Image (cartoon, rainbow, N blue to C red):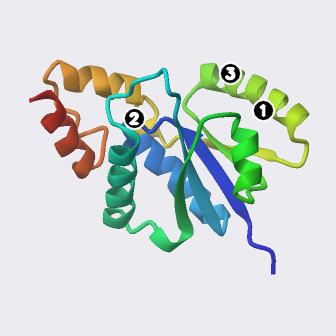
Amino acid sequence: MTEHVAIYGGSFDPITNGHIDVLRATLAVFDRAVIAIGTHPGKKGLFDFDERVSLIKQVIESENLSPERVTIVSFDGLIVNAARDHGAKALVRGLRDGTDLDYEMQMAGMNEMMAPDLQTVFFPASPSVRTITATLVRQIASMGGDTSPFVPAAVDTALRAKFN
């Protein structure tokens, strides 16, 4: 039997409740999910790659998200190449609003031209997480705000440690 693998790419800096929402949807449809953390040598994130992996693993465990079905990898090029490298046939993207849809449709079209065998699958964000972005979470944390409504507990703790 063929295993259905999807790749979910992003910076995950940090992983948010919105990311978890999309991961839940992915695992409801696919046998396995590859979380692909984009890394770029010239771009410094709040959390380094190893910290992001650690946080994602903690969250997958605490949220009972079938850790045996999730692989975490890094990629520094095109997501379509990472998908091929990890046997994914679908590229997962979350949609919060119409602005996301416009952007993601352009990306899906470009990705399809580069990798016609890779399908883009969109999952709409649940209403409770629709407004969450990692950028806003980082901004709130940097100003001493409460990020607990937007991120899992382990991430909230890590954010507080970064900014204290």
Q: Is residue 131 left or right of residue 78?
A: left
Structural distance between the alpha carbons of marks 1 and 3: 9 Å
SS under mark 3:
helix
**Amino acid at pointer 2:** Asp
Q: Earlier in the sequence, mark 3 or mark 2?
A: 2
Q: Is residue 75 visible in the rendered structure shown here?
A: yes
* Image depth: mark 3 or mark 2 in front: 2
Q: Is residue 82 left or right of residue 35?
A: right
Observer-nearest residue: 100 or 139? 139
* Image depth: mark 2 or mark 1 in front: 2
Label 3, on which residue?
Answer: 103
**Amino acid at pointer 3:** Tyr
Label 1, on which residue?
Answer: 108
Label 2, on which residue?
Answer: 13
Structural distance between the alpha carbons of marks 2 and 1: 23 Å
**Residue ID at (77%, 23%):** 106
Q: Quadrant of the N terminus?
A: bottom right
Neighbourhood count class around disc 3 (C-alpha, 10 Å): few under 14, some 14–19, many 20 upward:
few
**Amino acid at pointer 1:** Ala
Structural distance between the alpha carbons of marks 3 and 2: 20 Å
Residue 95, given in percent of the width and then of the height, sits at: 60, 34
Q: Earlier in the sequence, mark 2 or mark 1?
A: 2
Residue 93, given in percent of the width and then of the height, sits at: 63, 40
SS under mark 1:
helix
Figure check: 76 above or below 3:
above
Query: For the view shown, which residue lies furthest in the left direction?
Result: 164
SS under mark 2:
loop
Observer-nearest residue: 43 or 131? 43
Neighbourhood count class around disc 1 (C-alpha, 10 Å): few under 14, some 14–19, many 20 upward:
some
Q: Quadrant of the C terminus?
A: top left
